[in-house]
Image (spheres, helix red, strand yellow):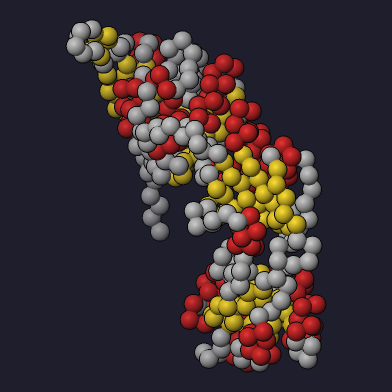
Amino acid sequence: MNDFKIHIVGIAEGTIDPRRVAMLADCRLIVAAASMESLLRQQLPDYPRSQIVALTPLSAALQTIAAHADQGNIAVLASGDPLFFGIGEVLGRQFGSDKIIVHPAVSAMQFLFSRLKIPWHDARFISLHGRKAGLQMAEILAHPKVCLLTDGENNPAFIAAAILRHISPRRRPCFSLFVGEHLGVAGERISAGSLEEIADRQFAQPNTVVILQDWTEETGYPVFGLGEQEIEHSRGLITKNEIRAAVIHALRLPAHGIFWDIGAGSGSVSIESGRLAKGLRVFAVEKNGEQLEHIAWNRGRFRAWNIEIVPGEAPTVLEELPPPDRVFIGGNGGRLADIVASTCRSLRDGGRIVISAVLGTTRDAAPGLLYSQGLAVEITTLSVERQTFPDRQIAGLNPISLIVGQKKLMWIRK
């Protein structure tokens, strides 16, 4: 068994590279998808049918490879480049990289870019095979050039419709979509269209999608430190710059995880947090219709697509959200006790809650509510004074307290 090799052979343009045919003929087994059987009959007509094994289900194919490994080399046929969202990673992990030899071919993604005459070195590549497109929408929208490997469920029409639901109508003209069907083989077709056009069409499988966004209006906003005048909001109802900075610092945002912004208002804390930690899923909870519109506009303007807008009132809508690692309670609608209780039940071990308190009633109640739920509590009171130069006009902001609750990290002794 120690001497065997697994040859992973890429297939492109409906043919096996002639340089690989003799090598395949000498292999003990050939593992291939059912769609490649006719190709094997054409190019290896004398190869025993009994030694051709189905690639699916994959678990059974892996067991068969292991069972026959001591009898000689084995070949696995794959579309395109086996190490590009392909079977190569699985086989290398299962049998060791020293046991595999990869013979790549041109991938469907390369084919599509070549047909479109668009450079692809700066594209973001995402596979949706067996995945939920909705969970990857932030990643899809976060880049001006994206190429997607699709499947039957995550097809071009489904993807285009999902983007339409996710963005504001004012952003729709910025998108151009291209779909390549049966790339490199008979029946190849390239289609182009807007989000609305692609969402209204059906496409043959397999297909690949390229999405381009027009980012010519990019204004070079800072990574952190957006000004109140840059964030769309209502009548001054926004977490002020200095307070927002202190809140985000107190949250100690993780690179990945779940963040609830309860009473999000215009979404200023959500926007800054989502832009800082792009791997964070941010849930902006807000009940006011006008504020919800502001959140949606700000999300698109600053491309903070990892924000999910949650219309409704806390704590009722919190029950449907995934357990958070971080929580900011900026508004509570007089239901602070209920919100804290609900949030603490869901908060993950080691999680943090930050409550901003302008009103004395909130400042007085919040520490005890957090402490009663078993959280360690710290209180910081901020007083901000702004001056303009050279006239030295002074503008003072209302003092605000930040109440921080930290949930203990539970260690399990084995």
Q: Is residue 10 above or below residue 18?
A: above
Image quadrant assignment for residue 88: bottom right
Is any atom of residue 2 visible in this view?
Answer: yes
- Name the residue nearer the viewer: 112 or 322: 112
Horizontal side, residue 34 vs residue 332: left or right: right
Horizontal side, residue 311 vs residue 396: left or right: right
Residue drawn at x 61%, y 91% as measured from the top left: 72
Image quadrant assignment for residue 315: top right
Q: Is residue 23 above or below residue 293?
A: below
Please provide percent x and percent y for residue 329.
44, 24
- Name the residue nearer the viewer: 379 or 95: 95
Can you name the residue that lies furthest to the front here? Answer: 117
Residue drawn at x 54%, y 81% as measured from the top left: 101
Please provide percent x and percent y for residue 187.
79, 62
In which quadrant of the rendered image does the C terminus lie? bottom left
Please provide percent x and percent y for residue 165.
66, 33
Is any atom of residue 127 visible in this view?
Answer: no
Tally of numbered discs: 0
Residue drawn at x 62%, y 39% as measured from the top left: 175
Residue drawn at x 60%, y 22% as measured from the top left: 312
- Name the residue nearer the viewer: 120 or 116: 116
- Name the residue nearer the viewer: 133 or 341: 133
Q: Is residue 310 above or below residue 276?
A: above
In which quadrant of the rendered image does the N terminus lie? bottom right
Horizontal side, residue 222 vs residue 138: left or right: left
Please provide percent x and percent y for residue 56.
72, 70
